[in-house]
Each structure stands twice: as structure tokens, then as C-alpha cells.
């Protein structure tokens, strides 16, 4: 799996330097040593032999190993210890090989960031100064001086390595956080666009459903009443009453259609609260449908929110229209009950009943949708030949008194 945050250019350059530093320092030390005129007897063969040993160690313990093994802590430790050991042998043979000892400081970075970095730097410093120091002539003052240098060098080089690694780790985390943030912003932008599209589509659908309900509750019901009155007028000689009722229904339907387009509440609720509006609706419906309708309001009347009053008014309107169209009833009753936490609307008739009270007709679906929109519910009980009872329940959310 590819690393989404590969090492930075600085890390890559430093890793390449660490790989080649032991070879460069070893080669430089060897060239200077061989160029020196002061060679002891048999010195060159020993120099070449020890250099070959150091070279073989670097190749066999690190360079020629598979990349997966080179990064393991055990392999890193063994390679580092071998480099220091060969560096000590070479420096004891010829002090110029202290240059090769310097590679230990670079290899110490492989232990970062941990306490072993400081241990590796300290070990390199001991080998570097210990191999080049003339212990036969060393004084206490000189030894203390070298120890002080080793301490300062360990803190400076080890601390620098650790800080550098920590900074690079922080940069990697920062780059990852920026990348994650950018990805999240892109995903949020796509999600926002999808939500806007869905909201737009939902708004269109809601508006269509609202208009369909309003048309059904106003124009369709008004036209049904007009047709009923015109048919009645055709059957009698004195048709004036029926024609007047049809004209009034047409005028009311036109008014309601205009108000529906403007998303206004029914005109019956403009200057009155729900009990008065439903009483007016019931009186007009009874006169138009020719059905005896008893209206009763119980409980302490409170002004409800406009949304609640409009919903109950439209439910009553739809339920009464269904009675007139389908029930063939002679009597009906409407009860509006204020019970404190909820308001109940019950419409009963003695008609033919409903075969399927859970039907999916538009009128029933419209009532259920309206009631769900204000947190209410609808129940229908019906027995064929014994009538129907429609019960609507809504929360008694109060509005401002008119």
C-alpha cells in the first residue's frame, strides 16, 4: 500500500547521505593514510586488511540486506556496533581513521527519536576520542576536558537529531491534517450540493402536494356541491333556491382557490376562531347537502395556532364532503373537544359505512398528511350499513388571540 504521505525531500536526502557516509569517510581515511610517508613496517597491509573488514561489514550488515530488514531495530543496532568496532580498530592502527568514526554520528539518527540516539552519539564520541587519545600521557585535566566535550557533543548532536525527527513528524501530521481537511471539505461540498438539490426537489414536491390538497379541499368540493345543486334544480320546478346555493358555492370556491394560490388560510378563519368557523361550515354544509348535522363544542375554548386551526378546519371540510358524496346519511354529528393537551375533532354519520377504513384515497391521504404535518393523527371506525366515525387528534398548541 502506497504511503499517502511519503518522506519529505529533506528526509530523503538525509537518508541517502546516511547510506553513503560510512563509505565516504572510510575512503577518505584510507586515501590520507596511504598518502602518509610515515608508514610503520607492515602498516599498509594491516591498513588494507582492516579497511576491507570495515567495508565488508557495511556491505554485509546493511547495504546488501533487503530493504525490509535494514529498518529493523536489531539490524540497525548490530550494524552500528560493527561500524564503531571497526572504526576503533582502524583508529588505534592509524589515528587518521577518526574521520571514519564520524560516520557513527550520522548512523545515530537511525535510532531517533528515542533515548538510544543519545546513547549512540555518546558511544561514537567515546570511540572517537578514546582511540585518538594518548592514554600514556593523558592527565586528569585532559580526560575531564574530553568527557565534557563528549557530554556537550552528545546533547547537541543527539538533541538535534531528535528535534529534527520530531519536527519532521509534526510536519507529516500537519500535511495529513491538511489533506484530511481538504478531503472533508470536498466531501462536504458534494454533500451540500446534494442536500440543496434534494431540498429543492422536496420543496417542489411539498408545494405540489399542498396545491393538490387545496384544490381537492376547495375547488373539487365546491364543484361537487355545485353539481349537486344544479342536479337538484333540474328535478324541481322552483329551482331558485338550488341555483342560489350553486352560485354561492361557486363564489366561495373561487375565493378559496385564490387564497390557496396565495397560501392563505380559509376565509372562514379570518375573523373567527375554529369553533365559529366550523359552526359556519357545518351550517352551510347541512343546508347544501340536506343532511341533519348536530354540532357540539366541549371544553374550555382556547385560541389555537393558525396551522392547527387550518388543519382541523380542512379535515372537517373533507370529512363532511365524504359524508355528502358517499355515505347517503340522514343524520351526522360533529364534536370539537378541547381537553387541555390535545384537541379532538369527531365526525359521525349513520350512512352506509366504509368497506376499507384504511383506504388510500386522496381524501383520506390528504387528511392524514395534514394531521401528520402538525403532529396529529387520524382514526377511522366504520361498519358497513352502520355509519362511519372519523376522529382527528392534534396537540393544543395555542396561538395569539385575535
Image (cartoon, rainbow, N blue to C red):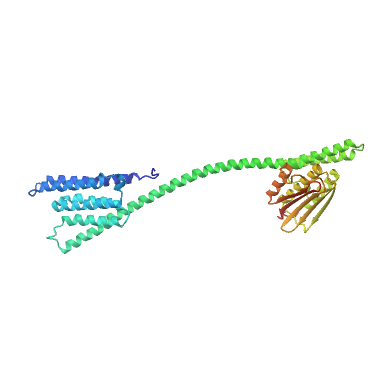
Asked where in the image residue 125 lies, by quadrant, the reply is bottom left
Camera-side residue of 317 and 330: 330
Q: Nearer the viewer, residue 54 or 144?
A: 54
* Residue 252, x across and y down, in percent: 80, 42
Extreme residue toward the bottom, this view: 140
Q: Is residue 222 visible?
A: yes
Furthest residue to the right?
Answer: 237
402 sits to left or right of 292: left
Residue ID at (20%, 53%): 85
Quarter the N terminus occupies: top left
Q: Where in the figure is residue 253, as x and y percent of width and height?
A: 79, 40
Seen from the viewer's position, the closer of residues 59 and 166 is: 59
> Between residues 72 and 88, which one lies in front from this camera angle?
72
Please, is residue 73 above or below residue 325 in the view? Answer: below
Drawn side of residue 258 relative to residue 185, left or right: right
Q: Residue 183: percent from the left, percent from the top?
A: 47, 44
Q: Horizontally, is 202 left or right of 168 in the view?
A: right
Report the label total. 0
Is residue 273 visible to the viewer in this orientation of the structure?
Answer: no
Q: Residue at x 16, y 64 (%)?
A: 140
* Residue 398 in the figure: left or right of residue 87: right
Q: Residue at x 78, y 44 (%)?
A: 322
The location of residue 338, given as percent across then percent down, is 76, 57
Amino acid at each position: 500500500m502506497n504511503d499517502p504521505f511519503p518522506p519529505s525531500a529533506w528526509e530523503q536526502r538525509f537518508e541517502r547521505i546516511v547510506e553513503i557516509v560510512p563509505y565516504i569517510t572510510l575512503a577518505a581515511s584510507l586515501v590520507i593514510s596511504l598518502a602518509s610517508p610515515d608508514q610503520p613496517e607492515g602498516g599498509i597491509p594491516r591498513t588494507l586488511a582492516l579497511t576491507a573488514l570495515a567495508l565488508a561489514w557495511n556491505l554485509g550488515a546493511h547495504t546488501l540486506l533487503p530493504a525490509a530488514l535494514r529498518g529493523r531495530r536489531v539490524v540497525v543496532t548490530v550494524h552500528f556496533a560493527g561500524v564503531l568496532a571497526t572504526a576503533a580498530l582502524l583508529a588505534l592502527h592509524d589515528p587518521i581513521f577518526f574521520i571514519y568514526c564520524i560516520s557513527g554520528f550520522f548512523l545515530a539518527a537511525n535510532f531517533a527519536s528515542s533515548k538510544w540516539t543519545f546513547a549512540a552519539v555518546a558511544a561514537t564520541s567515546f570511540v572517537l576520542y578514546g582511540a585518538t587519545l594518548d592514554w600514556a600521557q593523558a592527565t586528569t585535566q585532559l580526560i575531564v576536558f574530553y568527557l565534557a566535550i563528549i557530554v556537550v557533543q552528545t546533547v547537541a548532536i543527539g538533541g538535534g537529531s531528535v528535534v529534527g525527527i520530531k519536527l519532521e513528524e509534526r510536519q507529516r501530521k500537519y500535511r495529513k491534517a491538511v489533506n484530511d481537511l481538504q478531503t472533508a471539505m470536498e466531501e462536504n461540498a458534494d454533500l451540500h450540493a446534494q442536500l440543496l438539490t434534494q431540498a429543492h426537489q422536496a420543496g417542489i414536491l411539498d408545494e405540489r402536494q399542498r396545491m393538490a390538497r387545496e384544490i381537492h379541499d376547495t375547488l373539487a368540493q365546491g364543484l361537487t356541491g355545485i353539481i349537486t345543486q344544479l342536479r337538484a334544480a333540474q328535478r324541481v320546478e322552483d329551482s331558485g333556491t338550488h341555483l342560489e346555493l350553486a352560485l354561492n358555492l361557486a363564489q366561495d370556491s373561487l375565493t378559496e382557490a385564490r387564497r390557496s394560490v396565495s397560501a392563505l388560510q380559509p376565509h372562514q378563519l379570518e375573523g373567527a376562531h375554529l369553533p365559529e368557523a366550523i359552526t359556519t361550515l357545518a351550517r352551510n354544509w347541512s343546508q347544501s347537502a340536506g343532511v341533519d348535522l348536530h354540532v357540539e363544542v366541549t371544553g374550555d375554548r382556547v385560541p389555537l395556532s393558525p396551522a392547527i386551526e387550518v388543519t382541523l378546519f380542512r379535515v372537517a371540510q373533507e370529512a363532511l364532503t365524504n359524508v355528502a358524496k358517499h355515505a347517503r346519511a340522514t343524520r351526522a354529528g360533529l364534536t370539537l373537544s378541547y381537553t387541555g393537551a390535545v384537541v379532538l375533532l369527531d365526525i359521525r354519520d349513520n350512512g352506509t359505512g366504509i368497506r376499507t377504513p384504511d383506504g388510500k384515497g386522496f381524501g383520506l391521504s390528504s387528511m392524514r398528511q395534514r394531521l401528520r404535518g402538525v403532529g396529529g393523527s387520524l382514526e377511522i371506525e366504520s361498519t358497513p350499513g352502520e355509519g362511519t366515525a372519523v376522529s382527528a387528534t392534534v396537540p393544543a398548541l395555542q396561538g395569539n388571540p385575535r
